[in-house]
Amino acid sequence: MKLKVLFITIVTMFFLISYSSRAEEMVTYHIANAEEMVATRGVAFDMDILIKDANQVVGYQLELLYNHEYFDLLEVKLSDFFAANTVYNTDVDGKLVINYSKVGSPLQGDSVIFTLRFLPKTVVEGIAYDVISLSSEYHHEIIMIDANSQLSSTSSIQASFSQVMIGVFGDLSGDKQVSILDVGLLQLYLAGLNPLTEAELSRVDANQDGQVSIMDVILMQLYLAGRRTSIGPDIKYYINFNTMGGTSAPRLELRPGEDIDLEGITTYPDYELMGWFFDEDFTEPFDLEVMPKYDLTIYAKWEYRNDGEEIDFSDWYPEKSEITVWMDDQNGLYMQALIQAFNQIYPNVVVNHQHVGTVDARELLKIFGPSGLGADVFVIPHDHLAQSIMDDLVYTLPQSTLDKLEGHIHPVALEVASLYYDYILNSFDPSSPGAVKHLYGVPMSMESIGLYYNKDLVTTVPTTFEALLAEVSIFNQQPSYHTPGLTNAQRGIYGLATSSHWADSYFMQPFYSAFGFYPFGPELNDPNQVGFVNAIDALSFMVNQLKPQVTGYGTHNSVIGNSNFENGLIPYIIAGPWMHPAYRQAGLNYGVAPFPTLNGQAMKPFVGSRIASIYKYSDNKEVALKFIEFLSTETAMKIMYDQKYMLPALTTDKMMNISGLSTDEHMLAMAYQINQGIPMPNIRQLIYYWGPGETMIMRVWNNGFPPSTAAAEAEQSYRTQIGLYGN
């Protein structure tokens, strides 16, 4: 937090830009400091990063290093004018990468583009340290994108950064210690006889209330009398754990002198912990029993329990190899654990992680892949796969990989990661003359929607949807506890909701399937059989039986059902696993049930998967293949389950080997639902299905269109789009 009286001088760094939209002209940048500053351990300070003299700049790419040994990077705050798809990543070595940004309107003149918040952590006080630097070890270049989407870059960067002096908290005299002299100087200030700078005032704000008063004098006196262990913030020091493949361990925060207890801090299946070390080469054992006055990073040493079998990895990648992985993992803890486990098997492979969202990866790889700035391995939703292949981004995996995954990875997940493709005709039509089915990625996780219910309101979930609607009808007619004189329905509280809306075709697929509608034909892969005309019976059910119980006379999105469920007001909601964090945070006592039958048929939702693929033009395909194959192992799946709370894309029997999952009722319910579900189509034409499908339901639900008319319109709209935009 910024104190009312700051002793931290905010350091401002400028991108001095001589910019032209012509990419071939030389572009020069200068990054410089404003002035020096003094910081104190335990008190955060901000650095604003500015772009100066911008001319029609809409995006940029930047890499820099911060001094992670002496400063924690607490926050990267992006300016408000940047879009939500801005991608940045920090890693444990102090590298900050701003991969891509796009602003709503081009930047002109001087603008703050982001702010870095640091926390000093060193105890070596009175010494100046560089906070940020550029390094030739990393990509020594800034790429700018102008309003015409032209790129320009330079490797001619001048950098000059101020140093940060780590000061002693309570030191006003400048002698790098706290004494009665400092107390006297503070008392003189309070008497109006000794002016102090903002930096000096913040250094004696002992109780951290943002102001300096007689209370701070008293606290300093108690410290000098031995009655307080410190003057300023209650400072703790950290033990950071590099578990070297074991389960991730949060850092310990201890005060100096507190006992260090490492019992059970991490585990590693099939390995025995041999001890902790100060270095990753295991030459200096960690033997401290109490916390010192400095931060530590210690390394776990494991020994494989293999019942006497010798495994020699010496011939596996004896030379150092390096790959870049784009993974949606903003805090980096999941990837850190994953890389440690991978390096237990392949110690000579350096894996560089960059945080990139799964839905952003395809577009970003199109931009940065050709220049060599993209990823060797990237992760996408499976419904992005077909378009990624069309964009020439995806490497076809060898048959040997498929052989390893069969019988290990869930067959539905393998199905959505595989496609028929005719490279000659650029067609995904399985009947195309040259169409061959290939595996294009390794499934990591699976997800599907389910029926979530409030255990405090529901004793037994009905086994038929007709019975569930009858139960919901009774709930809707009950008097509202919050508004006397009104029923639940009159107050807008309906007993069944969706975390999306009632015209979302993804959420409505369970209803479609119960009435025999499966888009794109029986194999879900024929772009010429979108089949909206087969949805008429389902649409009739929706408007005549479903709508009265879930929105009444309202429109498809008139009821905000998700907040009603989170607040414990309604018994049922159709939702996906991405809602678990919100429901847990709300303190709900909830369960997940399989969909009941409807119309005497199973309700089958779509099943999706996150897929790890290899960039087609990667120079490191062999190593990248080892990495994505590792992602399919139970070790990697366990790390994903622990760190990301995602359902591993394993067969049911393999899934039960993941400790904790076999007793996780929420995950087991989703696993069961997935076994009853259908693969979500992964053909490219799927993007033309969602819009007409949503309009079709809205026509019937909101506007009273006959189902046959709405279905015919949707069919025509889809066919028009694939005619206009390719097939």
Image (tube, rainbow, N blue to C red):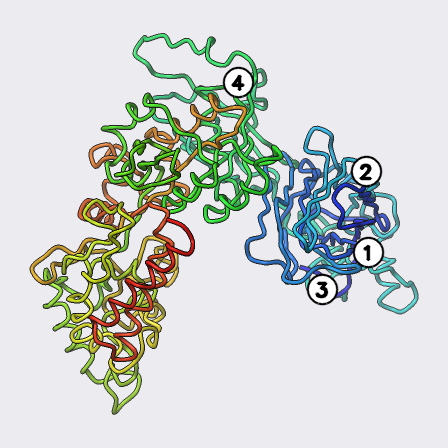
Which element type, helix, strand or loop, lies under badge 2? Answer: loop
Distance in Å between CA atoms under marks 3 and 1 = 35 Å
Instruction: Give percent across and percent down for residue 509.
Output: 24, 58
Q: Which residue is mark 1?
A: 53
Q: Which residue is mark 2?
A: 127
Distance in Å between CA atoms under marks 4 and 1 = 45 Å
- Determine crowd level at label 4: few under 14, some 14-19, many 20+ residues with C-alpha closer than 10 A: some
Q: Is residue 403 visible?
A: yes
Distance in Å between CA atoms under marks 4 and 3 = 50 Å
Q: Which residue is mark 3?
A: 210
Mark 3 vs mark 2: which is more N-terminal?
2
> Looking at the image, is 477 positioned above or below residue 444?
below
Mark 3 vs mark 1: which is more N-terminal?
1
Residue that appears at 58% across and 15% down:
283
Q: Amino acid at mark 3?
A: Gly
Residue that appears at 23% across and 70% down:
496
Residue that appears at 81% across and 36% down:
156
Q: Amino acid at mark 4?
A: Asn
Q: Nearer the viewer, residue 612 or 423?
A: 423
Q: Could you tell me if the residues under marks 4 and 1 are in contact, i.e. CB atoms within 8 Å?
A: no
Q: Amino acid at mark 1?
A: Asp
Q: How many marks?
A: 4
Left or right: residue 239 compared with residue 673: right
Q: Nearer the viewer, residue 621 or 433?
A: 433
Mark 4 vs mark 3: which is more N-terminal?
3
Q: Nearer the viewer, residue 131 or 346?
A: 346
Left or right: residue 151 compared with residue 530: right
Q: Which residue is mark 4?
A: 348
Instruction: Give percent across and percent down for residue 534.
Output: 18, 60
Select label 3 or label 1 by which is in front: 1
Check the picture and name the quadrant holding the N terminus.
Answer: bottom right
Please identify the quarter of the rendering in which residue 653 is found.
top left
